[in-house]
Amino acid sequence: MARTLIRRVGYGLIAVLGVAVLAFVLEFVVPGDPARAIAPRAGSAEVLRNIRLQLHLNQPLAVQFADYFWGLLHGNLGTSYVQRQPVATLIGQRLAATGWLALAGVAAEVVIGGALGVAATMFRRVRVAVGAVNLVLLSLPQFVVGLALLLVFGFQLHAAPVTGGAGAAQIVLPALTLGLVGAPWYAQIVADQMQDSLASPYVRTAVAKGLSNRYILRRHVLRNVLSPAITMVGMDLGAYLSGVVTVEVVFGWPGIGLLAVNSLQNLDRPVIMGTVIVGAVAVVAFNLLADVVRMQVDPRTRQELT
Amino acid sequence: MTAALDARELRVGYGAAPAVRDASLRVEPGQVVALIGETGSGKSSLALATARLLPAAAEVSGRISISGQDVTALVAAEFRRRRAALIGYIAQDAMAALNPVMPVGRQVGELFRAHRGLGRSAAARQATEALARMRIPRPGDVARLFPHQLSGGMRQRVMIAMAMALSPPLLIADEPTTALDVSTQAEILSLVSELRTGSGSGILWITHDMGVVAELADYVAVMYAGRIVEQGPVTAIFDQPAHPYTEGLLRTRADLRTGAAGTPLFQVAGSPPAPGAEPAGCAFAPRCPRASTVCTATAPDLALVGDAQQAACHHPAAAAGTAGAAS
Amino acid sequence: MAVVSTGASGPAGPGAEAALPDAAPAAAAHPGQWPGTLIAGTVMLAAFVVIGACAGLFGSPVHQDVLHGLTPTGLPLGPGAHHLLGTDTLGRDELARLAYGIRVSVIVAVVSNITSIVIGAAVGLLAGFFRGPVEAVLMRVTDVGLALPYTLAALVIAALMTAGLSRVIVIITVLFWSYPARLVYGEVLRLRGRGFVEAGEAMGSGGLTIVRRHLAPHVFTLLVTYSPLNAASAVVFEATLSYLGAGINPPTASLGNMISDGQTAISYAPHLLYAPATAILLLTMSFLLIGEGLKARNPDLRRVSWLGR
């Protein structure tokens, strides 16, 4: 088990490294003058030359590359062109908000999706209805769901705040949006896995042992649902922690995603690159975490099957 | 003495296809009854029906008594409470029949927790003892392992341990050695032989292998197309089979063992009828060397031939114990 | 003789507990037949394709009708005789914009679907077939592709290109190829495990022949069944990108930017949101229905997991 984990960590590091290299290529090599981006109204060439000196932009590419990576290893993601602050600080300020939204969103989709999946498995008449609901939810982009909720609950029913912010009241609709959009995926794997389990010989053995149906569902069936569900939760947490851009934009939630979008409009490249790298780290880290938890729950996954 | 299993006029159907058509079977305590037949003969359906393990879509009728109790009259909840103490079921594929994410010790222990009300550690101790009775080495360590970490033979021992845990009067073994290699099969058979004398349970052993029947069973019932076509003590049947299908099965096996190299092996020509498409009259008639007009007209009932054998045939061969040949 | 229906879940007695539900298959398999979902999805998709192809018939999507296109106070019109679906905040005809937006979505779905799958399949095939260092490199690159946070990476690429159709197609291709790559890679490994490749080599077939004759058909079926889901994701992603300003920007019409325009008027003209949202819903749904139908036709593909977005 340790060997598999170490290998996965290695792959993850390589992936993050790859993303960092990509970010470097885009930031430093693509045409576009950072100096002018920082000081767009600067008149004299003198000012621009000073800025370039400060940013080490006149150094050979290899040196810039080394500088960049050295900085990365120390958590230095560069400095924002627009806000004159270290990118790491800017991202750090928004991390909590994005974190809360990510957790709330994952909780919502697991609960809604899990309920749908269990209902579809247990009650035949509900199965078709759940299928239709899943189809509709899968066909809607996040921003459409978010806007619909905002329209109905915010503007028409006045039940939820319509201005931005990061409070407890404001998290409801964005989390619900994430929950609704992600629910069909969980409903699908829960229903599939439950059906596989119920049709399996080991449930027949459990019935033969005279165990109660409730016990069988709890101990034998749902246990087996955990494994694929945990994989999904890991993927989702990683993806959401890199900033749920669309939802943050729709609701004005002050997270990393909103920071990235604003930076895009301002052409503040270091911030954009920084968010991408942080996002990649989040994705890799949480996929790894999900793997670890899953190995605990499902012992078959502890050895890498060739 | 009360039979471990007394099944009467059992019928099992899946929609339009009948799997078991009117079968009656008895297993005495301490006796091993082998139920032999080809795939599709209905033997698994019969066994699962007696244990009430068929899916709800199956239609089952008939009377089933286990150790004197009429289980067909019991309501589901009541039957559930008693079933582990009445019937032990040993599945064919132990890898699929054990929960892959639960240690095997806990899977055995569940029985004691649910039916004897034991706590976790007491149940674990009982489970380890049960595994030890199956001649599993270091049972305490094995109990902590997961099914995929055990060999096929070990898994099957775990299944047998689960089936025998509450010492039920009836054990139903559904081809438990079919998926095992020959040496492991021999181990399991010898284990069961040892256990049966001590336990006093009646065993219904499903198989398609005459060799297993010869080694283990006291009594054998041969199934064809959903009906029991011959039954009797193993020695009698092997010496003098009365039904032509049984003859065919035995001859195939004999050829395998003693046939001269180069000569074609004997096989019963044709194949069994599809469920739902059985011919009127005797289902074996199309393949039978002794078939006559009466065979295609009416289906024969089981009738006594010789001392202890029964065969459903209009032209049974001379059975053990009859004087002179009849044809 | 008692007639009894037995089974795992029997009749509920006094103090009934939850009965174990029957494990019926999720969707009935129709190998060889044309399932209803497939037909419904194809019909819907055909309708959208027709609308998109004939978008020119609906009038100009960018002409701002200042005379008749706005209310006296300068607000967008509701549905009426002149403009069947009303006008947007700049007096442009909603129906025409909708038709052009649909055209964009269909083009994006088809083109980026093909490009992402072709690239992904090539990578997956090469990695799975040649193993060794080729596999290691290609799979690590795929890992990078899978580790990229979708929307953020899209914004980055968007910042480097000018707004328009090609930008969207490039973004989607770059972000979507790694999933089919992993799918195909997994399938090739699975097929290798079943001995096709070794058998082919033993018979003396060259590498390319093995790929063509043994691997390609299975992989092709896998991709055909996967592509509707890919196309559906592409439609949704393009709409999202255009909504965020990272895809197709106004005045060119896209279902996504129609919604972002409409959002500014959400309190007084919410009808601007209904048409594009419904179009996105139905177009995506048509692809998903086709995907479901194809899966029903190929029951052994039901086992393949579509996890990932």
Image (spheres, coloured by chain):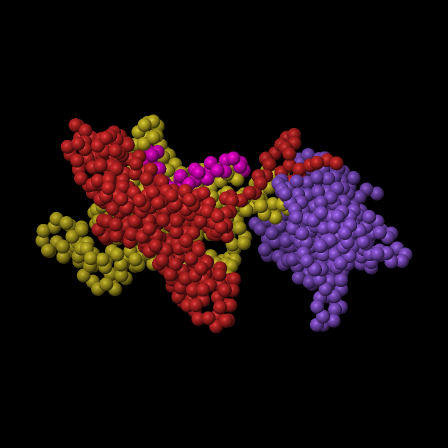
- At horizontal 24% and vertical 37% (from top left) the residue drawn is C94
Q: Classify residue B57 as left or right of residue A159.
A: right
Q: Nearer the viewer, residue A199 or B310?
A: B310
Q: Position of residue C128 (x, y in %)?
A: 43, 63
Q: Position of residue B139 (x, y in %)?
A: 67, 54
Q: Is residue B227 left or right of residue C132?
A: right
Q: Please, is residue A46 above or below residue C44 in the view?
A: below
What predominant SS class does the magenta segment belong to?
helix
The image shows residue B142 at horizontal and vertical percentages of 64, 54
Q: Residue at x 23, y 49 (%)?
A: C164
Q: Position of residue A6 (x, y in %)?
A: 45, 59
Chain C takes which shade in the image? red
Q: Is residue A104 visible?
A: no
Residue B242 visible in this rendered orientation of the protein: yes
Residue at the extreme left: A44
Whether residue A141 appears in magenta in the rendering, the answer is yes
Which chain does the purple colour mark? B
* Quadrant in the picture for residue A14: bottom left
- C4 or A103, nearer to the observer: C4
Residue A195 sits above or below residue C140 on the image: above
Q: Which residues are magenta?
A: A122-150
User: In terms of depth relative to the viewer, which is nearer, C23 or A286?
Assistant: C23
Image quadrant containing the N terminus of chain C: top right
Write down the colour of chain A: yellow
Q: Nearer the viewer, residue C16 or B23?
A: B23
Left of B187 or right of it: where is C121? left
The residue that appears at 23% across and 53% down in the rendered structure is C160
